[in-house]
Amino acid sequence: IGCFANRLLQELIVSRVVFPCYPTESSALQSPVFTKQPGSIVYPVQTVENNREVVFSCEAQGSPPLVYRWKLNATEIIPKAGSHYSLSGGNLRISRLNKDQDAGTYQCLASNSFGTIVSREASLTFAYLENFKTQRRSSVSVREGQGVVLLCGPPPHSGDLIFSWIFNEYPTYVKQDSRRFISQETGNLYIAKVEPSDVGNYTCVVTNTVTKTRVQGPPTPLPKIEVQFPEVVHVAKGSTVKLECFALGNPAPSISWRRVDNVPFPRKVDTRKASGILEIPYFQQEDAGTYECVAENSRGKNMVKGKLSFYAPPHLIEKPQDVQKLIDDSLVWECKATGKPKPSYRWMKNGENMESTERIQVANEVLSISRLTLSDTGMYQCVAGNKHGEVYSNAELRVIAVAPDFSHNQVRSQTLVKVGGDVLIECKPKMSPWGVISWRKGSEPLLETSRVSILESGSLRIWNVTKADAGLYTCLARNQFGVASSTGSVTPTIITTQPATLDVTVGESVVLPCQVSHDPSLELKFTWFFNEQLIHFGNHGGFFEKVGGVSSLHIFYGSRKAERLQAQSRLQPENAAVVSLGPPGPPTSIHVEEITDTTASLSWRPGSDNHSPIMAHTIQARTPFSLGWQAVTTVPEVVGGQQLTATVIDLNPWVEYEFRVLASNRVGTGEPSEPSKQARTKSTSPKVTPANVSGGGGSRSELVITWEVSRLELQNGPGFGYVVAFRPHGTTGWMQAAVPSPEASKYVFKNESIQPFSPFHVKVGVYNNEGEGPFGPVTTIYSAEEEPSRAPTRVRAKSLSASEAEVWWKALPWNASRRRVLGYELRYWSRSEREDMASVQRTVGNQTSTVIRGMRGSTTYYVSVRAYNTAGTGPPSATVNVTTKKPPPSQPPIKVMWNASNSKIILNWERVKALENESEVTGYKVLYKKNRHSRPSVMETNTTSVELALPVDEDYIIQIKPFGEGGDGSSSRQITIPKIPGIKSNHFYCHVTCAGTLVQYMRVKFLCASFTATELCKNTVT
């Protein structure tokens, strides 16, 4: 809220200085970013619908909270009371759909104080299929041996259609072969050469793939290239294109296909000559060209040509990134996309299109803004588009205005400098826009001289330092938003004892001395540097220690890698070098010189040998699929210390690799080099077939084939897909279909001629743009089966208790008419419930009885049984009813008393009386166990006492419950019998639970036995 208020003030108050509010690194504030964008919807319109609605999803992250808006055909939607538009979060719900008003293109807009972003476009279209208008068609006359075309003339519709023809009556469908062809473009049926068996009634069947509705046309009484494709067909990248070609003639012509440039078809191309269709999945640039259909019989041939033209919607390859800039800085964003035709670009700010101005240049894919101001802050989008679509990318620009601030970068509090040396005092305030820097010494302004200079960066440099330069120096920074300062001191010193250069071996320690003379009135501070990096004592792995305050440095080497160390004191530029042996430094300049599908040639430069010659190199590789860095095989197998090239072998094709090199000497192996740039091996045809090919199930007349998706590192190249080959048992020719998606794991072949539960030989192969791979092993898969056609008979039911009933039935014949029975499904419902709310219980296999549990007592249930398999359930049996028994007693046993003597436990309790609506008590169950986690033992009795032979040296837990024909009743409270050591033979311990309290008596035997539980409880009071 504070940020938003500041921005409003900046716009409303011109005469006052207002600082914009921006989040710190730990803040939760965030500009809008889409996490879910709307997708296009094809809505099936049914003939009768009461509540039609769709929901477009839109979710984004951002803080402050986001505000969502929607546009339909570029016009903002304003939900009102009673409107059929409503918002739920960012989601747009459209109820009471109207296909004339609501069809169109939708976009979601998400806004907060940082700006507005616009989602991709999503369309709403309506799929429907009306009935055929004509009720009758005239008959068609044709001579035997001639060709004929039966027109389908599909009714008005929206959505993709599938066409089939019924011959005479359902379910006899026309089978396509070399004589008969059904166009999936027009629905027309073509018969190349009519035979006497073709005479009959033909009915066109049209199915909408979206609504799943099916309508039949009026029957048509029966019996040159008739079907040809357009001269030019535009095909999108990655899509599937089908070309149809069929000819009439006597004898029936054969159909063949070829490319005019004689390039052979890859395996992914499906040429089903019998049906006159050429199918090219996963269409790529190399598939574009001119194709020819040839129809030929013994009397001649005819040809038709058509061109396939490749196009691709835009795809972003370079996107602008979020950026934070200071006032008066410049911004350049670039956005690049691929596509055919070449995409054009436009830029948007907060959802509105941008135009070039004096400061802002919108030049196709480049956006540049000079002299940035606070008003330039916002959300920007690059939109790349061609006639086949648009893609959006988002980026946030923050322009910050900051008063001078030294809180994160103060002037060094004390600077020690050698007399006669030079010193640089840095001044690096944070401020935007950049302002004016000035210096003071003490309380007086510092003037520049030949020895004193204020640099452009604002830092102060003093040459040839004297003792007179000692004192306090203050840097002042000023811009239009404020002033700030930071102060530090300069202390000239003279080093009297300098650190010396030493040679040391790995594992030894060394002390570097440093003595200095200085003004005794000043506090002296020693600072040590290691290779120009400040030493923080206690860090650096504990290798450095203060000696004599910090005037001397103690270096512990231990197992630290050896190298040439420069230890330097900030008192003056005096260095001490410590030289030791160690593992080699990392190699540099790793380059991939040449790469093939399985090899990569590398070169590199040696790193430091750390005073011990390099003896060998090790090469490691990493891919997006590997677990970290892995050693690889090289040629030569052992890469010597003087060798700076090697060839890595046994790589996977079409995989991005990074390589690194490690050097070793007699001390050990050094740190690895920086990774090489990513390099992708060249593509080749795939070699590994999918695993776990199986299938089965599905709907009527379907063969469902499944497999495991091939891992990306095994696809060996772009354009990866699967080839599914199948044939019925007993046949020789394979039918093939290409599945172009590398993520696909299922193929469904549907043909009305497939018999239920028929065995097929199936194998799955692979291909990519480089060629065809192998097929996997042949497996047997069964087509979809039909539901069982018969109902179980002789169904009976019997109540076992208040909550259980047993049901029996007679099993159906196994595999009858290929309609398998995998088990039986029981549906049961009470008299007060509807049948469609019935509970369901299934059995597996040829089981002919089961027990239903969890029923209510004294309730009448209806039960039906039906057989099931993978296709569904069959017809239900005759319904039977069963009434469960009365519920068991709800009252638990009370006034439980126990006596202990020697090793016997004698339990007594009051008889439980059942209520009127409960089943009579026929006995009691005594459950006893040694501890809470052991399984209880059970003793049944029809009396109210029991004697248990139990050892008296352990605790026991006991419960008692009544039972009847309705089942087990409620249990008594748990009773714990404690250890009773050393019982005298002439005494009993008498125990009774009185109002939940355990009471213990010690009596002689006859006295104990003479009391009832009620009497003992009364005695407890006195």
Image: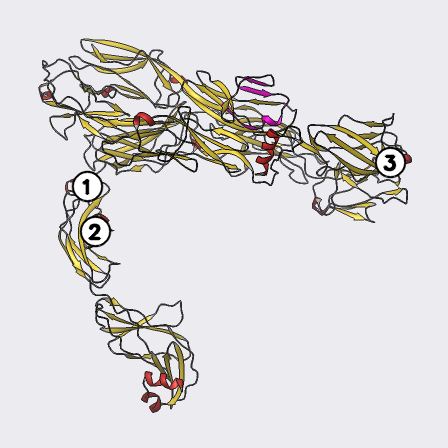
Residue 365 part of the magenta segment: yes
Q: In terms of depth relative to the viewer, which is nearer, 315 or 21?
A: 21
Q: Residues within 10 Å of mark 3 (few under 14, many from 20)?
A: many
Quadrant for the N terminus in the image: top right
Q: Which mark is residue 787?
A: 1
Residue displayed at 27% across by 35% down: 704
**Lateral position of residue 99 relative to residue 384, left or right:** left
Q: Residues within 10 Å of mark 2 (few under 14, many from 20)?
A: many
Q: Secondary structure at mark 1?
A: loop
Cα gap from disc 3 to disc 1, whole angstroms: 98 Å
Segment colored magenta: 357-382
Q: Is residue 234 above or below residue 203?
A: above
- Which amino acid is tagged 1? Glu
Where residue 90 appears, as percent x and y from the top left, is 43, 35
- Which amino acid is tagged 3? Lys
Q: Earlier in the sequence, mark 2 or mark 3?
A: 3
Where residue 312 appears, as percent x and y from the top left, is 42, 20
Check disc 3 and report the residue beneath it.
418
Q: Secondary structure at mark 2?
A: strand
Say if residue 856 shows up in the picture. yes
Quadrant for the C terminus in the image: bottom left
Q: Earlier in the sequence, mark 3 or mark 1?
A: 3
**Lateral position of residue 209 relative to residue 4, left or right:** left
Report the colour scheme: secondary structure
Where residue 135 appears, as percent x and y from the top left, is 13, 23
Cα gap from disc 2 to disc 1, whole angstroms: 16 Å
The quadrant in which residue 998 appears is bottom left
Q: Residues within 10 Å of mark 1 (few under 14, many from 20)?
A: many
- Which amino acid is tagged 2? Leu
Check disc 2 and report the residue beneath it.
826
Q: Earlier in the sequence, mark 2 or mark 1?
A: 1
The quadrant in which residue 412 appears is top right
